[in-house]
Amino acid sequence: MNITLFSSKSYDKEFFDKVNVESNFNYNISYVEQRLDLSTVDLLEAGQDVVCIFVNDDASRPVLEALKAKGVKIVALRCAGFNNVDLEAAKELGFQVVRVPAYSPESVAEHAAALLFTLNRNTHKAYNRTKDANFNLENLTGICLYGKTAGVIGTGKIGLAMIRILRGLGMRVVCVDPYQNQAAIDAGAEYVDFDELYKVSDVISVHCPLFKENTHFLNKEAFAKMKDGVILINSSRGGLLNTEDALEALASGKLRGLGLDVYEYESALFFKDLSNEVLKDDLYTRLIMNPRVLLTGHQAFLTEEALTSISNTTLSNIKEVVETGKATNTVLN
Ligand code: NAI
């Protein structure tokens, strides 16, 4: 089995190589640093059976056609979301497409909570100030989260982990999901509709997948229904939020703070060191220049536990497809 990872970083290599040997998969794994798209498909060496991709790799129809022509049979996503794969094309072209549906959901929720804590209490600003011996406390005031209401959108694995954290802080938690999760109710969350969630929440955290239908559902209409001064956290997918509308909501005071681990145009930016370049994305520049925005570069998954689990599940998915022709973690119906 020859496997090539696109968008690979040192931590991918470290954990995939370790799990490959320790769990006796013993596959031939190659690593390509570049993101997969039509211009990088040719970096794939001959004889590769599996292409393993991450959140910002492009698995659109033309890319899948090029992969097929090179003899690739399996597209193994090493992430949960699969909005970057043209599933119709993948099916037509006869690919098996597998993903990692869960890998330490607590890791992602803990990062969302870190964004909330940092943004609320301005510890990122305080860190810079105290390094400069500036002990002025002006503009560092936060709110006490205890007794406030948090709205959680999406109560699957990560949403549930977030509910448990928020309940642990002594917050009331209301939530929205087309499917009720009994564990969320048992953890003390109350299901409401979107209008009610927007009306009562002091903090809103988003934990649902991105589909065509919910693209930009967090837009000016949604902000209009929210309380003034809400803190919004998005660690799910950038496309869920209309960034332009969010900047307006920050300017008007509707949003007190915006904590993001994802950005709708992140595929051109994230996972690379662009610190020496002049960025051409004005929307991004306006976002990071805003003092009420805290942004991390899609790192909510980045814990040792999650990386071990991602490597294990990805290689097990491939093994299952090779041995049985089917995959429990398929994304194709
Ligand atoms: P999950 O599949 O366990 O839960 C998602 C939940 O969202 C489901 O209960 C589903 O019914 C609900 N949902 C679907 N559409 C909805 C809508 N329009 N409104 C409200 N709820 C809706 O997925 P999991 O593992 O909790 O992951 C959630 C999302 O987090 C992923 O889809 C992915 O986009 C993102 N993610 C981000 C990571 C990061 O590093 N920033 C890492 C892993 C996941």
Image (tube, rainbow, N blue to C red):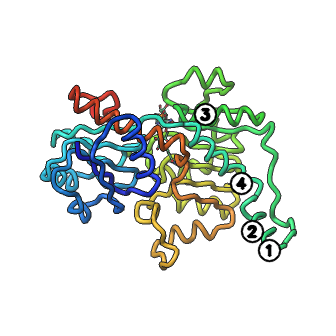
Viewer can see residue 45: yes
Residue, x 49% and y 29% (percent of image)? 178
Name the front one of labels 2 and 3. Answer: 2
Residue pointed to by mark 2: 128
Queried on whether the Cβ of the residue with tag 2 lies below 8 angstroms from ligand 1, the answer reads: no
Quadrant (top left, top right, bottom left, bottom right) of the N terminus: top left
Q: Earlier in the sequence, mark 1 or mark 4?
A: 4
Mark number for residue 205? none
Under circle 4, the secondary element is helix
For the residue marked with disc 3, what is the amino acid? Ala
> Left of 326 or right of it: where is 128?
right
The mark lying in front, picked from 2 and 4, is 2
Q: Quadrant of residue 26?
A: top left
Q: Position of residue 323 (x, y in %)?
A: 23, 28
Residue at coordinates 77% horizontally, 39% vertically from top-left?
Answer: 148
Labels 2 and 3: the sequence-earlier one: 2
Q: CA distance from mark 3 to mark 1?
A: 37 Å
Q: Tell me where residue 109 sits by quadrant.
A: top right
- Real-space CA distance between mark 2 and mark 4, rounded to the nearest whole angstrom: 13 Å
Nearest the viewer among 303 and 167 is: 303
The residue pinned by badge 3 equals: 161
Label located before the other in sequence (2 or 4): 4
Badge 2 marks a residue whose secondary structure is helix
Tags 1 and 4 touching, CB below 8 Å: no
